[in-house]
């Protein structure tokens, strides 16, 4: 039993020596670092303090993902041509009816101008043809003109009236194409 007690006391003594040696080592190594810093002239790291306060802090969330528009629409042109104007920037909010694109309107304006001129020419020719028709009718009624010439003149008047109607249809189509050249947002 004495041997056991002596063995335990020896173990405790050895443990105490190891702990004491470790403590002295740590104390000595810390002094060496402080002395070396003082010799080399390294300045201590400054520490700043501030008073705690309550305020809003901006929140930034970074992540990988996909952004989708609130509303999407497929835009198709009703007319062909070169896009000469883009009236919005990508990501911009648009309302229904806001302009988006403009297709070059000059060809459609040229067609409208041509049809307007053609209609004016046909109206002038119609006035002359109707005057001639009235003369042919009077002369045919008196027996001085053949019915064939009167009927031909009537056909000419009818053809000019149809040409004027065709010019009006071309003008209507050209006006529509001018409107379709201005592409607007269909929805908000």
Image (spheres, rainbow, N blue to C red):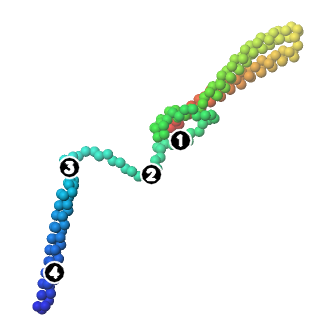
The CA span between labels 2 and 4 is 63 Å
The CA span between labels 2 and 3 is 39 Å
Q: Secondary structure at mark 3?
A: loop
Residue that lies at the very extreme toward the front in this rendered image: 39
Mark 4 and mark 3 lie on one chain; the one further toward the N terminus is: 4
**Total numbered circles:** 4
Q: Secondary structure at mark 4?
A: helix
Q: Is the N terminus in the top left, top right, bottom left or bottom right quadrant?
A: bottom left
Pick the residue in front: 176 or 138.
Answer: 176
Q: Which residue is mark 3?
A: 48
Q: Is label 4 or label 3 in front?
A: 4
Query: In the rendered structure, are the residues bearing label 1 and label 4 in contact, judged by CB atoms less than 8 Å apart?
Result: no
Q: Residue at x 75, y 15 (%)?
A: 125
Crowdedness near tag 1: few (<14), some (14–19) or many (≥20) residues, C-alpha within 10 Å: few
* Quarter of the rendering containing residue 85: top right
Q: Is residue 94 left or right of residue 130?
A: left
Q: Which residue is mark 1?
A: 73
Give x and y (percent) for residue 126. Answer: 75, 16
Mark 1 and mark 3 lie on one chain; the one further toward the N terminus is: 3
Q: Is label 1 or label 3 in front?
A: 3
Q: Is label 2 or label 4 in front?
A: 4
Q: Which residue is mark 2?
A: 65
The CA span between labels 1 and 4 is 85 Å
Q: Secondary structure at mark 2?
A: loop
């Amino acid at each position: 039993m004495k041997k056991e007690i002596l063995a335990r006391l020896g173990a405790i003594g050895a443990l105490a020596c190891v702990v004491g040696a470790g403590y002295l080592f740590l104390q000595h190594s810390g002094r060496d670092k402080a002395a070396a810093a003082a010799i080399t002239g390294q300045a201590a790291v400054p520490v700043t303090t501030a008073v705690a306060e309550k305020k809003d802090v901006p929140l930034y969330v970074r992540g990988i993902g996909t952004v989708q528009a609130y509303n999407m629409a497929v835009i198709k042109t009703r007319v062909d041509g070169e896009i000469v104007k883009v009236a919005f920037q990508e990501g911009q909010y648009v309302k229904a009816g806001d302009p988006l694109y403009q297709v070059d309107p000059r060809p459609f304006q040229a067609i409208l101008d041509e049809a307007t001129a053609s209609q004016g020419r046909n109206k002038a020719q119609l006035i002359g043809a109707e005057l001639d028709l009235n003369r042919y009718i009077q002369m045919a009624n008196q027996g001085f003109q053949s019915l064939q010439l009167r009927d031909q003149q009537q056909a000419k008047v009818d053809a000019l009236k149809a040409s004027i109607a065709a010019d009006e249809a071309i003008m209507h189509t050209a006006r529509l194409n001018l409107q379709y050249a201005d592409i607007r947002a269909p929805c908000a």
